[in-house]
Image (cartoon, grey):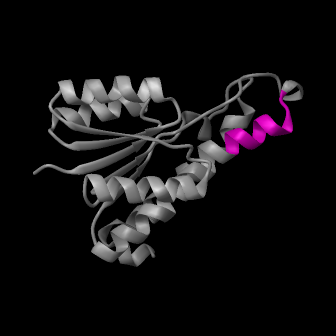
Amino acid sequence: MTRVVAITGASGGIGRATAREFARRGDSVALLARGERGLEAAAEEVRALGGRALVVPTDVSDADAVEAAVERVETELGAVDVWVNVAFTSVFARFGDISPQEYRRVTDVSYLGYVYATMAVLRRMTERDRGTIVHVGSTLAYRGIPCSRPTAGPSTPSRASTSPSAASCSTSAAACA
């Protein structure tokens, strides 16, 4: 059975690798990220592996842009079966060298991006009573490393939202609404 899968942060790293794995299964894969060159390259890989690709340039830190992206994915590919939140950014520097704007950007992408995407797609999944949302987190939620403070904070909520108690809602989307 072919699924519709949407992946944030799909232009590189774990997001792009995830897109390739779903493509190998023949799934339709919506690729969301800001970097259009990386998205186009990821789309070529998806197609070469047997999947159908849809490039959706999106900044996940913008709630309206995420809502529009979900609408586009569902209009062009069909109802989302699997949504994977991978989008991530960080600043690796000493604490005193990081500006408030840099902290804000990390939080907006690495935490609020997950929140906005989950809000937009969960509503639709709840109406259908089916679908899966995957949050890919950082090990920094468990153990910090030097010069990685901005990443540790936003990683912790994604860890909490995928804990066993949160996972107990997975049997019914309506139970989590």
Q: Closest to the observer: 32 or 111?
A: 32
Q: Is residue 133 magenta?
A: no
Identified at 27% across, 24% down, the residue is 45
Q: How many callouts does the rendering have?
A: 0
Q: Residue 101 magenta-drawn?
A: yes
Q: Name the main secondary structure of what is drawn in magenta.
A: helix
Residue ranking furthest to the right: 96
Side of 106 relative to 73 (left or right): right
Split into 4 quadrants, where in the image is the C terminus?
Answer: bottom left
Viewer-proximal residue, 102 or 69? 69
Q: Does 108 sit above or below residue 78? A: above
Q: Measuring from the top left, give residue 60's x and y in whole percent.
A: 56, 47
Residue drawn 77% across and 22% down?
A: 93
Which residue corresponds to the image point at 67% horizontal and 38% vertical from the top-left? 152
Residue 144 visible here: yes
Q: Where is residue 38, by image quadrant?
A: top left
Q: Residue at x 37, y 77 (%)?
A: 174
The magenta span reads 98-107
x and y percentages locating residue 52 in the rendered image: 21, 39
Q: Is residue 106 above or below residue 2?
A: above
- Please tell me in which quadrant of the rendered image residue 126 appears: bottom left
Visible residue check, residue 153: no
In the picture provided, is 138 more to the left or to the right than 135? Answer: right
